[in-house]
Amino acid sequence: MSKITSITGRILYNSRGNKTIEVDVKADKNFLGRVCAPSGASVGKHEAVSFPNGKPEEGLRILKENANKFLNLDPSDLKSVHESLRSIDPTENYSIIGGALAFAVTIAAMESASMALGEPLFKTLSKEEEYRFPFPLGNILGGGSHAGPGTPDIQEILICALGSKTIREAIETNFAVHQELRSVLEKTYPDFTYGRGDEGGWAPKLTNEKALELSAKACENLGFSLGDEVSLGVDFASSTQWNEQKNRYVYDRGGFENSPEEQIEFASNIIKKYKLIYAEDAVHEEAFEDMAELSAKFPKTLIAGDDLIVTNKKILKKAINAKSCNAAILKVNQAGSLFDALEFAKEANDNNIKLITSHRSGESTDSHISHIGIATKSKMLKVGVVGGERVAKLNELIRLSEHDLIRGMAEI
Ligand code: PGA
Ligand code: ZN
């Protein structure tokens, strides 16, 4: 059995240039697990807080003061590592230590265990006979809280190459659509600056409708039919528009407002018109019944909860009872520790809720989530298309395609 012989941390920076925390866990003095935590911009009300009082330094101080609580634990015993964290922070939303620290400590421990075992991380995370690749789901055009004024209110238009037979083909197809979309934007708007949002999607000054139309055009220009070789998805991130006082969704940039009923209609029209395979947070984070209406209407589309479920097992159970979603986003740092996230994944898989493991808008260049996506039997991996911190995850999938344990693409 391996033992944790040291645990240390440091302050680094994420893809937005904001401070974050990195943790090194060493097993048997030799085997290093190193994890740098991401953080979100469109953050759900009920997710784990990133840092105690918003301060990464405070998380680091707590780690240093409590390092001995982790020493001599078996790094592959995720439950024990998690329980040590919980002995420091029993709060539901990790307000004492921050979700970023919980994320980094638990994943780094498992990585050090995988190093000691001489096996890839996905195998240490989950023992299966065979594994599948999740389909990469990439942001080709962005707006909302990931891009500036004038961009669409809708946060993300996404591409997924569901017709691809290999992971390389799926990744290359996403790149091709992203590139073609640039040409389409350039031809339509000669003053397009090639500006991109936080996750690498183009961030042009466009209405929601036009953004969707041009994204579809980019696919068609490449000879693809929507719903065949490629499909579009949308993260509405509609809690950003939701105004509780008004009881309406306020689309500042589009200059219109939707009642809850109109919002369902608005999302339904987009799902139908663009044959979306994926629709995330089409209604706000507490609208479980409205989500259920969409799920009933579109059984073939992944109706996914991100801010709605925040990788929280209790909330997932509520969503399952209300039949709100047939799919759920898994972001480890929303849950807090990897242990919490894997428990969440089990609950989802046991209830036929399709998982989409996801990056955050403020990312590190780590690629652990590629392994987590495989180990949790995720159908899709939402990691963007371009930008070093996004491509890092995609490149890791290509490396992993050298393993014969992974037998092809997920079945959606
Ligand atoms: P976030 O965005 O990381 O800013 O929360 C990603 C998403 O909403 O899917
Ligand atoms: Zn989202």
Image (cartoon, rainbow, N blue to C red):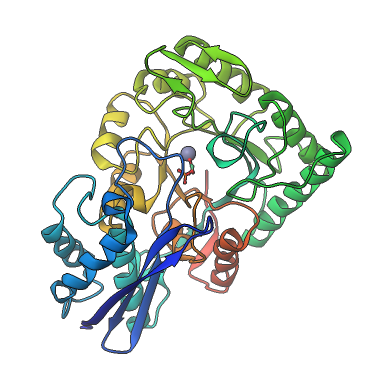
Please give left or right for residue 244 compared with residue 91 in the image.
right
Please give left or right for residue 205 compared with residue 367 in the image.
right
* Residue 319: x %, y % from top left: 32, 30
Could you say which quadrant of the image residue 24 lies in? bottom left
Q: Residue at x 59, y 28 (%)?
A: 153
Could you say which quadrant of the image residue 139 lies in? top right
Please give left or right for residue 174 compared with residue 53 in the image.
right
Q: Residue at x 46, y 31 (%)?
A: 281
Callout count: 0
Residue 144 versus residue 79: which sits nearer the camera? Answer: 144
* Residue 342: x %, y % from top left: 30, 54
Residue 322 versus residue 267: which sits nearer the camera? Answer: 267
* Residue 20: x %, y % from top left: 40, 61
Residue 165 visible somewhere in the drawing:
no
Residue 392 versus residue 276: which sits nearer the camera? Answer: 392
Residue 46 versus residue 330: which sits nearer the camera? Answer: 46
The answer to whether residue 374 is above or below residue 120 is above
* Residue 279: x %, y % from top left: 53, 32
